[in-house]
Image (spheres, grey):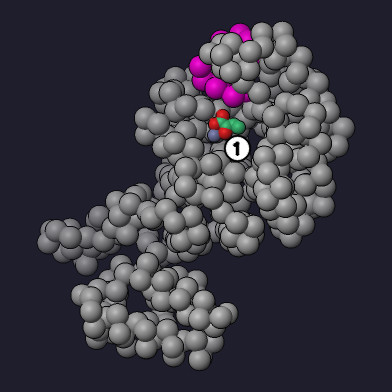
Amino acid sequence: MDKLKIFDTTLRDGEQAAGAALNIQEKLEIARALDLLGVDVIEAGFPVTSPGDFEAVKRVAGEIKNCTVCGLARANAKDIDRAYEALKDAVAPRIHVFISASEVHMVHQLKKNRGEVLQLARDMVARAKGYLSDIEFSPMDASRSDPEFLYELLEAVIDAGATTLNIPDTVGYAMPHEFGGLIQNIFTHVRNIDRAVISVHCHDDLGFSVANSMEAVRHGARQVECTINGIGERAGNAALEEVVMAIRTRPDYYDVTTSINSELIYPTSRLVSQRTGFSVQPNKAVVGANAFRHQSGIHQDGVIKMPKTYEIMDPHSVGVPSSSLVLGKLSGRHAFKERLAELGYNLSEADFDRAFNAFKELADKKKEVADRDLESIVAEEQRTVVE
Ligand code: KIV
Ligand code: ZN
């Protein structure tokens, strides 16, 4: 089976979600969690945009050793030089160069013609290649670009040294069948396409980001760009947890594997939700609070007799705490400790005692203490200790 690379852009496109700014410490904490999760590439940021983002990419590059660390750059010399400066200490650095390829972007935003875009893409990929061997190129708004121009652009950047060609559905406009067809056509029409890995980057404006990514995988894409909880610009990006679990759950359909440690999906989802302040909707696939909870009597009866009746994934396989364990005022230290461990917390004895007391106080006021209440208790506990 082929390996599908998981390129996580939570720290770059995810952070572009309005209101989701992360500080350097938060970015480092999420990068460590992504590394443990087993992603192949972490896109740590867009170094030229601010001194803070430059520093965050530099720190992630210096610390993360098990996967590629990538920085984004527009197709201009300043962006590329700055990205290299931020990334140069990484064990496996990658520069991701992008330029718009659709008519509407080139005419109204870039104010450049096709020839100029082609020249810039070729020259700037070559410039990045002068620094590093691992270069990714994205023709922005690819799904709304003229396919003939797109093929020409991809051929030019392969010649200039790009090793990953990322095809973005920047505004979430494509339909699954159409996007799969575009990927297939790229394999058919682009010269020397076998020299590069084809990647996809889909947005969720019409709710098709995961469907489009998966259709691309069926047509030969071997890298998917995604974010934890699907956060990202506007309606967000393809959700990592959905892509990974579709592959795990339907091996009959997708002939690829990933190196994701799926048991760490839920704790990573909680961490990203806490640090960005973006709550996860209860009915969110894979990581929503209700994803493995059964309300109707018929469903409960079925799950008790045989979980597979209504659960297509084992909740433990994505690290979701046991679906039957409800924490409330009658719960003891053992259940509390178990749930904290499932959420990825391992407190010292003294911290645990204080957290348990806070839990009991809260449980007196609420019917059920939810995971996010536990996270607030631990966060409050850690804040008090630091102060
Ligand atoms: O959506 C997009 O086109 C992007 C590119 C920078 C890859 O985020
Ligand atoms: Zn994007």
Please tell me how many numbered marks the rendered image carries.
1
Residue 249 percent location from the top left of the image: 41, 48
Query: What residue range appears in magenta?
Result: 139-151
Image quarter of residue 100: top right
In the depicted structure, whether residue 147 falls above or below residue 95: above
Foreground pick, 106 / 249:
106
Query: Is the N terminus in the top left, top right, bottom left or bottom right quadrant?
Result: top right
Visible residue check, residue 218: no
Residue 125 percent location from the top left of the image: 78, 26
Residue beneath the point at 86% across and 37% down = 131
Foreground pick, 130 / 243:
130
In the depicted structure, whether residue 161 falls above or below residue 382: above
In the depicted structure, whether residue 4 falls above or below residue 340: above
Residue 292 percent location from the top left of the image: 30, 59
Residue beneath the point at 72% across and 52% down = 55
Foreground pick, 256 / 87:
87
Q: Which residue is mark 1?
A: 223
Task: Give the dominant element type of the magenta stretch: helix, strand or loop.
Answer: helix
In the depicted structure, whether residue 10 falls above or below residue 184: below
Q: Is residue 70 left or right of residue 209?
A: right
Residue beneath the point at 45% across and 39% down = 236
Q: Is residue 81 left or right of residue 362?
A: right
Residue beneath the point at 47% across and 73% down = 379
